[in-house]
Image (cartoon, rainbow, N blue to C red):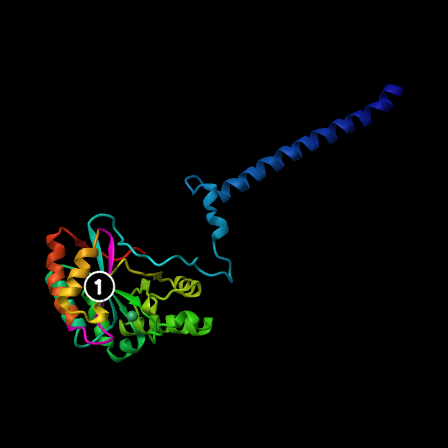
């Protein structure tokens, strides 16, 4: 009688113990599944933390990064870049020279010039060249302006370029006027989907030193992976055109191939 009275509580305790064990085991299994979904096989090591770096609804689309100063491909490549155009006198001459030597280049265009000569933007794209946003106003003190002004100057020129090239064109790069960068500038450019573009070789053609001096500067400084700064607008660029006519065959003779900057 006493034995039968004691039996139900013992059974109950065992049932509770088994339930606790089952719940604990199922919790551990479900937690390990959740962890597996967060880090799929073949993903980056934990230190990269790609999931946490992903943008939230109000977060910037991309982190800012330092201006690129190398070609996309490694090896004996150079990237030619032409700033401050498009210019009706010089841009077509430069396009012809590039075509004669099988070269590609990147054109960093100013919004005010783009609005005056949209047909030149379309021509640059048709010839297989790449576009680079160089702001609407070419304000070399852009880094000192407030964020709204910086954003308007950068995204305004991007819109000008897209409009001039019938909308369906990439603007993969942004270059700050005068190469005067700030964290705000690189952040806004990156957020707009453009790679901040620097240079590694300044031809100093903008000082109008004469074509032979421009040629000598580039020949002395160039090395594999170089991004070369030249100008097709913003002033008299006859020296740049003359220098390019010498530099292109020289570069080819040195075994260089032409590439775009890294993105
Ligand atoms: Zn410029």
In the rendered structure, which segment of residues is drawn in magenta? 224-238
Residue at 15 percent of width and 73 percent of height: 238
Residue at 29 percent of width and 66 percent of height: 132
Residue 46 visible here = yes
Label 1 CB, ligand 1: below 8 Å?
no
Residue 96 visible here = no
Magenta stretch containing residue 65, yes or no?
Answer: no
Identify which residue, 222 or 24, lies in the foreground: 222
Residue at 36 percent of width and 74 percent of height: 139
Left or right for 15, reference 116:
right
- Which residue of the protein is positioned furthest toward the right in this rendering? 1
According to the image, label 1 marks what residue?
Answer: 203
Q: State whether residue 147 is above or below residue 77.
A: below
List x then y, in percent, for residue 176.
34, 67
List x then y, in percent, for residue 98.
15, 63
Determine the image quadrant of residue 233.
bottom left
Q: How many marks?
A: 1
Magenta stretch containing residue 237, yes or no?
Answer: yes
Q: Residues within 10 Å of mark 1 (few under 14, many from 20)?
A: many
Left or right for 25, reference 218:
right
Residue at 58 percent of width and 39 percent of height: 31
Left or right for 58, reference 238:
right
Determine the image quadrant of residue 241.
bottom left
Determine the image quadrant of residue 99.
bottom left
Label 1: which secondary element: loop
**Quadrant holding the N terminus:** top right
Ligand 1: quadrant of the figure = bottom left
């Amino acid at each position: 009688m006493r034995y039968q009275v004691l039996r139900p509580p013992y059974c109950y305790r065992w049932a509770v113990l088994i339930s606790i064990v089952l719940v604990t085991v199922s919790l551990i299994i479900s937690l390990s599944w959740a962890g597996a979904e967060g880090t799929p096989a073949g993903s980056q090591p934990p230190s990269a933390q790609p999931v946490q770096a992903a943008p939230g609804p109000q977060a910037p689309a991309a982190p800012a990064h330092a201006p690129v100063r190398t070609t996309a491909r490694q090896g004996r490549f150079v990237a030619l870049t032409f700033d401050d155009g498009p210019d009706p006198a010089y841009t077509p001459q430069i396009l012809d020279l590039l075509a004669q030597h099988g070269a590609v280049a990147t054109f960093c265009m100013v919004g005010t010039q783009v609005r005056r000569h949209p047909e030149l933007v379309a021509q640059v794209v048709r010839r297989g060249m790449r576009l680079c946003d160089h702001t609407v106003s070419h304000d070399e003190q852009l880094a000192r302006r407030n964020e709204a002004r910086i954003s308007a100057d950068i995204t305004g020129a991007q819109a000008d370029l897209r409009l001039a090239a019938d909308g369906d064109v990439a603007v993969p790069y942004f270059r700050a006027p005068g190469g005067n960068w700030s964290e705000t500038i690189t952040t806004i450019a990156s957020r707009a989907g453009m790679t901040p573009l620097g240079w590694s070789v300044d031809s100093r053609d903008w000082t109008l030193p004469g074509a032979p001096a421009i040629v000598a500067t580039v020949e002395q400084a160039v090395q594999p992976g170089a991004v070369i700064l030249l100008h097709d607008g913003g002033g008299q660029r006859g020296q740049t055109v003359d220098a390019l006519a010498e530099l292109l065959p020289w570069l080819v003779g040195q075994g260089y191939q032409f590439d775009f900057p890294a993105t």
